[in-house]
Image: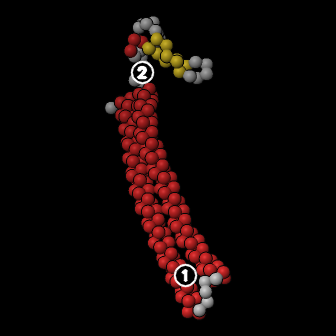
Amino acid sequence: MSAAVLLLMAGGAKGAAIIQEGRIAKAQGSFEKKIALRNQQELERQADAEIAASKIESARISRRGKIAEAAQIAAVGKSGISLARSTLSVLADTAAQFFIERNLALRSGLFRARSLRQRGAIIAAQGRFAKTLGTQAQRLSFAKAGGSILGSAGASGAFKGGGAAGSKITTTQTGTPTPSIRPSGTGTA
């Protein structure tokens, strides 16, 4: 085999390897997106569990408050004191404290759930971005592979000696290649 054929084969092999890298990048991006979406779903389930747990805790606190209020009323009744100002004030303060504690439990659960959902949204966005990057890498691999094949073809001399219609590539003063097409037989080979 001549050196030109070997260069063309090497360029083709390199192009095929570049395209395979692009396929791998796309597959990896798709896989990362799937993982991210599953992680988001798990965080959604955790957020729902946080809300359910905070509702249960709120109900427990409310029940303890009712028990404490009933115990205070029973103590007042047992002592024979009427439900006057100070006694009512103590009962109202106890009820307010349990109400605040109950609302705090609910709000804490809602805040934790919101935080989990936001993390899930960020993770899902990262997964979608990874898939986009993989798809872009695959598209870019086609251009890189074409460049590699054309580069090896040029290096092998496949374009020398009057290609189609005697086309020839010359270099401008800045070093940028510019095609110049001359009629067959008038160009220099």
For the point 58% across and 88% down, which residue is it? 76
- Crowd tier of the residue under label 1, counting other residues whose Cα lies within 10 Å: few below 14, some 14–19, many 20 or above: some
Residue 162 sits in quarter: top left
The numbered disc on residue 159 is: 2
Q: Is residue 144 above or below residue 76?
A: above
Q: Earlier in the sequence, mark 2 or mark 1?
A: 1
Q: Is residue 35 left or right of residue 115?
A: left
Identify the amino acid type marked 2: Phe
The front one of 175 and 119 is: 119
Residue farthest toward the left in the current orientation of the protein: 1
For the point 42% across and 12% down, which residue is it? 166
Circle 2/circle 1 CB separation < 8 Å: no
* Mark 2, secondary structure of its residue: loop
For the point 61% across and 89% down, which residue is it? 81
Q: Position of residue 38 (x, y in %)?
A: 40, 56
Mark 2 or 1, which is nearer the eye?
Answer: 1
The front one of 36 and 9 is: 36
Residue 82 sits in quarter: bottom right
The front one of 18 and 76 is: 76
**Residue 14 can be seen, yes or no:** no
Q: Is residue 71 left or right of residue 185?
A: right
Q: Position of residue 175 (x, y in %)?
A: 58, 23
Q: Is residue 158 above or below residue 92?
A: above
**Which residue corresponds to mark 1?**
69
